[in-house]
Image (cartoon, helix red, strand yellow):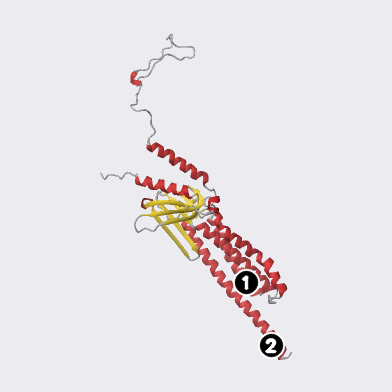
């Protein structure tokens, strides 16, 4: 393999790595964001209590789980 | 009052048992004035009418914008003896913009991405990356919708028998709870403007408070005239409370 053939592959790998890095950083920010949302939901349900608060909190927890799965998928697939 | 005794041997007793009995004069209580409906009686009637009207317009579930005497919902900062009378949110119609936005965002991958792919504008990143990006996109759309729903759910206006409370949650990291005593309310106005507001009966309720206290505004709430009437009634009740004399 000549240098001229290796360089485009290296460039493609760099782009791929950059995209992966970008997605990982974005996913981590998203995970932090949904944790903050969950915390705020907890505070708001203390102010306005209802039997349906459990459903809302459960959805927030599912979101956190989904964010974690997303980070894992990015590292695995992307 | 002496008891009236009916003598069975009385000849005036008919077969039906009804006798011409003499009612002692002491038994007749003459009222000095004819029976009249007092102002307090009128207020009781009006209170019950207003409350029944509130009840009739009240929603039943947590996902409702107007609830009168809500069951299963409580205000965490309520004091002892404080009853939740009305729980208000912005009218459900005000959620239409973000609902439509969510729908459009949901459909974007089905429309825009194939067009971009066909035109060659999308870089060739591989199946795995494409899948991850798609999942990311829909998670983002879900978060957008969920957040907007939360903002609507937790931006509430509460009227209790003692206070008026405004709970604001307009962004993830900002929340504010303001309240004022019913006794400090000086004026209540209901305003309704716009075609949608007229059709769906929602509007603003402006509450002016005394002195340096901040004024309150209930924005886009259902049945604003009814809400204003109820708050006025509560302020009048506060004004008519007789102060207890110290003994």
Residue B207 placement (x, y as % from top left): 41, 54
| Outermost residue toward the right in this view | A1
At 55% from the left and 72% from the top, the residue drawn is: A29
At 50% from the left and 44% from the top, the residue drawn is: B55
Label 1: few (<14), some or many (≥20) within 10 Å? some
Q: Which mark lies nearer to you, 2 or 1?
A: 2
Label 2: few (<14), some or many (≥20) within 10 Å? few
Which quadrant is the N terminus of chain B positioned in?
top left
Q: Is residue B136 left or right of residue B34?
A: right
- Comparing B126 with A77, the one in front is B126
Image quadrant where residue B132 sits:
bottom right
Image quadrant where residue B146 sits:
bottom right
- Secondary element type, mark 2: helix
Vertical placement of A73 versus B170: above or below? Answer: below
| Outermost residue toward the bottom in this view | A2
**Chain of residue at mark 2:** A
- Respond whether the residues carrying marks 2 and 1 are from the same subunit: yes
Which quadrant is the C terminus of chain B positioned in?
top left
- Tell me the CA gap for discs 2 and 1: 30 Å
**Chain of residue at mark 1:** A
Residue B4 placement (x, y as % from top left): 38, 17
Q: Are marks 2 and 1 in contact (CB under 8 Å)?
A: no
Residue A7 image label: 2
Vertical placement of B141 versus B247: above or below? Answer: below
The residue identified by callout 1 is A72
Q: Is residue A2 left or right of residue A40?
A: right
Vertical placement of B174 versus B239: above or below? Answer: below
Residue B229 placement (x, y as % from top left): 44, 47
């Amino acid at each position: 393999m000549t240098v001229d053939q290796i360089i485009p592959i290296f460039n493609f790998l760099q782009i791929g790595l950059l995209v992966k890095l970008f997605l990982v950083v974005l996913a981590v920010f998203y995970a932090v964001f949904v944790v903050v949302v969950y915390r705020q939901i907890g505070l708001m349900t203390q102010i306005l209590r209802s039997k349906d608060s459990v459903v809302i909190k459960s959805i927030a927890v599912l979101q956190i789980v989904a964010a974690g799965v997303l980070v894992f998928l990015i590292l695995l697939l992307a | 009052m002496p008891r009236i005794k009916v003598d069975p041997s009385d000849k005036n007793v008919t077969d039906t048992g009804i006798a011409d009995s003499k009612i002692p004069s002491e038994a007749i209580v003459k009222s000095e004035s004819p029976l009249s409906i007092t102002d307090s009686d009128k207020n009781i009637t009006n209170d019950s009418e207003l409350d029944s009207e509130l009840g009739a317009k009240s929603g039943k579930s947590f996902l409702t914008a107007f609830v009168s005497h809500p069951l299963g919902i409580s205000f965490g900062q309520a004091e002892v003896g404080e009853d939740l009378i009305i729980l208000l949110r912005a009218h459900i119609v005000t959620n239409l913009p973000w609902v439509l936005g969510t729908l459009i965002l949901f459909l974007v991958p089905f429309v825009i991405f194939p067009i971009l792919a066909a035109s060659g504008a999308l870089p060739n990143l591989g199946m795995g990356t494409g899948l991850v990006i798609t999942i990311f996109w829909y998670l983002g759309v879900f978060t957008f919708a969920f957040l907007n729903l939360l903002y609507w759910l937790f931006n509430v206006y509460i009227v209790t028998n003692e206070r008026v409370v405004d709970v604001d949650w307009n962004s993830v990291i900002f929340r504010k709870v303001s309240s004022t005593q019913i006794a400090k309310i000086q004026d209540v106005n209901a305003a309704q403007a716009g075609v949608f507001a007229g059709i769906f009966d929602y509007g603003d309720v402006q509450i002016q408070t005394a002195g340096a206290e901040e004024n309150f505004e209930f924005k886009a709430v259902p049945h604003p005239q009814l809400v204003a009437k109820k708050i006025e009634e509560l302020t009048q009740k506060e004004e008519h409370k007789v102060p207890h004399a110290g003994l």
